[in-house]
Image (spheres, rainbow, N blue to C red):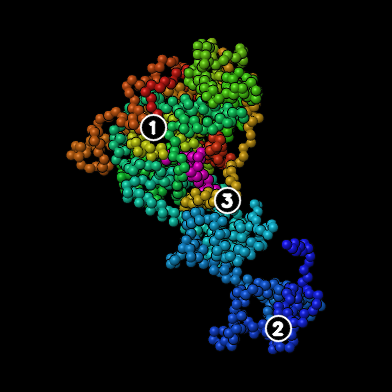
Amino acid sequence: MNPPLLLPALVPVPLQPDFPHTQPRLRQQKKSAEQKLEAKFEALERLLKEQFPFDTLGHFLQVLFYNPTRSEPDPRGRTHCLVVSQFLRGRSDIKMSDILPLMYHHKSSYPTSRTEHVSEQKLMFSTTEPTLNEIHHARPFISTWAVNLVAAEARRQVGRATRDDPDDPEDHTRLCARTNGRSGAHVVSWKELLSNFSMKSIHDKFRVRVPLPIFLTEAMAAPKSKGVYFVRKRRPHPFIQVGAISSFIISRNRYANGHLAVILGVWLFACKSHIDVKRVFCRFGYSVSDTTARNALNSMTVASLDDLRTDITTATDEGTTHGFLILDNVQEYCDVWEQGIGRTSELKVGCAGTWVKADDCAPGAFDAKPYYDKVALQERKTLTSDSLFDDIDWTSMRVAIPLQWARALVEYIPQLQHFTTELNAMFRTGLASNYRMREGRKTECQPLPTNAEHSTELQGMARAVADFNRSVGISSEDPGKTLQWIRGDGASYALLLNLSTYLGPTGTFKNVIATPELWHTGATDLNSTAANHYGPSTSKDPSSLSKCSNIAGLKRPSNIKSCDYYPTRRNLTLIWTAHVLDCWRIELETDDLRDFFNDPKTLNPFPDFEFLLGRAGMLVDKYATQSAIQASLTLKDSTDRTRESKVKAGSAWTAETTATDDDSEPPGLSEIEEPDTPRNASVPLPSKAPNDAPKVHEEKEGFTGDRVLRNSQIFMQDFGWWVEFAHSIPEGDIGRALTSHQIWIFKFAGSSHANYVNYLLEVYCLLCYEASKDLKNAILNNWLLNIKGELGRWLPGDQHQEHYNKWTEYMMKKHGGEFDEPFYRQTISPNVHHFLLIKEEVETSFDFQSRGQTHTSPSLSDELALLLRAFKEEEVHLFRSGRSLGHAAVNQFARGWRRLDEKLDAFLTKSTVHGDFLQEIRRRAEVDGGADTEIQMRSDSPAESIPSSDLTDEGFRAPSASSVRSASSNGEPVDPNEPEDDGEDLSDAQLTSGPGLGMVVDAESGLLVDADDEGEEEDGSGDEVEDIDEEPDVELKTEDEDSEDDF
């Protein structure tokens, strides 16, 4: 067997034989790309030199791309047509995208300095539109031709954008500010401006309708990174594109203003921009002219009121109530610098109103018949001071006040701020919660045209209400079968009650029910507390507000009977917080609260929330109850209290000799000089502080109590009720607010505010005795407004109206005239609500961060530290027998308790006239055989009988015989030296300045924050206090004996 043939492993096999072939190759050798291109160039050279039948390449290309018109015969061959069409349609391997760049970037396409057409270098991208045939070089020609082509297309697209989009029926490029009857004219409306406005949506629409201008402006304005456009934060290019293209469109057609110009024109008007700013923006094409903006506002007023009248008419036809009316007086003093005949400075007055849509109302809630049936029963005659006291929801108040004390400590101590969530939950869902508004509800409102009526006078109020009713389509002569709810401040409420009494039988005000607004009531109590506790201006008593103001460097009001609302609220809140924190310091047995909580021993174990609430309740019992106030009058009463409620004793007190200070203000009631100028005079009346000399309070011989401690206790109790009221409003808990109102009935009865005693009693009787369950719930559900629908943003109706009033009054100061002129009735007043909204919409649309609408208040931490140190050194909250420093605050609640019975008799005598009238009408109707009367209402029970209340299922309890107690039967002495009231009632006076009840609750922290600018003027009321020698108090009922919640 032969061995296998083994070949060498790496023996190369030659590709070319060593000997020559005599036969030719059947397949050509493969050529490289360079060889192929060289062969093509040689063939092209032979073609152009020997076989090219054209004079130049240009002639060849002209013939190659010959494009005959439809009317001419096509001389091209089939192959010619097919080759050219395949190339132009991009179906060949080489496309125009390959050829055109070669031509444009060819070195011979650009003129060099050696050519005779060197001037064509300046024709690159020429915009002067030269004759294209005169350009020789390819690159200048292509660029210039492309520029003109793009310009023509951009112009066409912008011209197309001046008309409505045919594919979008909701697109309205042309918004008419007003119409003269033109068919098809689309008039601007607030709904279209606010609901559809968005810079992003406008930019997206432009991308579809004008893509070329969007592309060009983006290339010019947008920054680029790694070949990709990105949006800057400070000046985002999409907004700049929208502004530029919108101005391009309105430049082409001045009626094409629907993209951006109209809303910016109205926005400039709402921002009170200077006329020169408006003119410049109009010249830029960013906005319409100021005249067009005003015409648009007038048209939107007409449309808004027409829609409102339609809705109200529909609701009336269905037998329901659409909403209610909030009104307030407006006034502005207008100076005339060049006076003459008919030209003098004068106070312009008028009345403004807002129609608010009612929410969460049961069907038939505002039916008139059930209401008049209950009025005729005269159940309010059973009202007594004891039944009123028993109806106060003390259960929720005993929870709410300690929570306020705990909140003061939590806000002061950083280590405790994690309890904020639990505190908010207690206020919103715990026992403190009483009757909360439905969360997420957004109030709809429409301001009404103003009028020039004197709404502070009876006839002026009647004409003002009639004017508002005409604006919304309500007939004053035929009120129908439903009630009309009208709300206002204290003075307006009193006039509405009188009109309902006097004109109700005539039919004009027959179905009107009225309620006072909450802000003015709170401002009245704030003034009452200030006047009661400020004391002499040079007082040495650390419990007086004057001394506390001097310690903290705060300004004392020039007239303590009518204080500026905002600074008074701020100062009293600071002083009250200092009082509460010093009580916490004593309770925790420490010299400094923050050092106490910084101590590791305190934090282990750390006090829990239950411990905090328990201690807060004990502190309230010690310092902020009627029993605690009473115990501070004598040493015996103070020492006899239980250990948990006893105030600790301080160092021994050495009496000082006090002297009268001629510059000090009296702590009690004093006569105020009545001005000689009539109420409707043209010159405003300046407020004057009383000038009579003060009388420093002197204790009787043998006084063993502590007047300083007692003053601080009264202040912590009284202002604690106000703090609870102010906190409940933005939280939307109307039940807590009305509980404070019930307490204030007694407090106002012990002060000079007799008017507000009657106002609050009237409200109580309405809700307790005369309103059906559905009507009461409807009133409670709509007493507060929430324009934004956000948590912690509820506010009283009169505060909301004041926000509108400042707009109207500002324009009066600037424009002049009268409040019933068309400028105010059509342009300003009905649109003030949207003026506030449009500024927020524009701010949101431009992606601005939410900006606070208030001035940042400086921190009061230093002032608080000074007060805490003074309270500690003076031992304000320790019992020091015999201490008195010339200031004695009035326990207005206890005094009101004793006086309320007398005031109730006068109130019931006056307020039951209407019910007596209804009873007489029904009695005569029964005598006549049951014939229909003018009021057309008949009770199922005899008119003369007054049955017991049937409203126990509505949250109110009818007073039982066992619960009725007289204030005079409590066995407590009355001070014979107690001075009488001077009879002057400042409850309807106005605050000289202040921003309104400018507080909201932060949804996360639950803290009260300011929501109004400092220094803005609002209405309020004043107060007076009485100077007393010694005020014996009553032990108020705190047991839970068969009590039910009132509100």
Q: Secondary structure at mark 1?
A: helix
Binning the other alpha carbons within 10 Å of mark 3 as few (below 14), some (14 to 19) or many (20 upward) gives: some
Q: Secondary structure at mark 3?
A: helix
The residue located at (52%, 61%) in the rendering is 258
Residue carrying label 3: 843
The span from disc 1 to disc 2 (Cα, nearest Å) is: 104 Å
Seen in the picture, residue 770 relative to 104 is either above or below; the reply is above
**Image spot of residue 872 (x, y percent):** 63, 20
Give the label on residue 764, or none. Answer: 1
Amino acid on which the number 2 mark rests in the picture: Leu
**Image spot of residue 1032 (x, y percent):** 47, 17
Amino acid on which the number 1 mark rests in the picture: Tyr
Is residue 20 in view from this perspective? yes
**Image spot of residue 1021 (x, y percent):** 50, 35
Dots 3 and 1: beta carbons under 8 Å? no
Seen in the picture, residue 1022 relative to 4 is either above or below; the reply is above
Is residue 800 found inside the magenta-colored segment of the image? yes
Is residue 289 in view from this perspective? no
Q: Which residues are magenta?
A: 782-810
Q: Nearer the viewer, mark 3 or mark 2?
A: 2
Binning the other alpha carbons within 10 Å of mark 2 as few (below 14), some (14 to 19) or many (20 upward) gives: few
Mark 3 and mark 1 lie on one chain; the one further toward the N terminus is: 1
Is residue 788 found inside the magenta-colored segment of the image? yes
Check the picture and name the quadrant holding the C terminus: top left
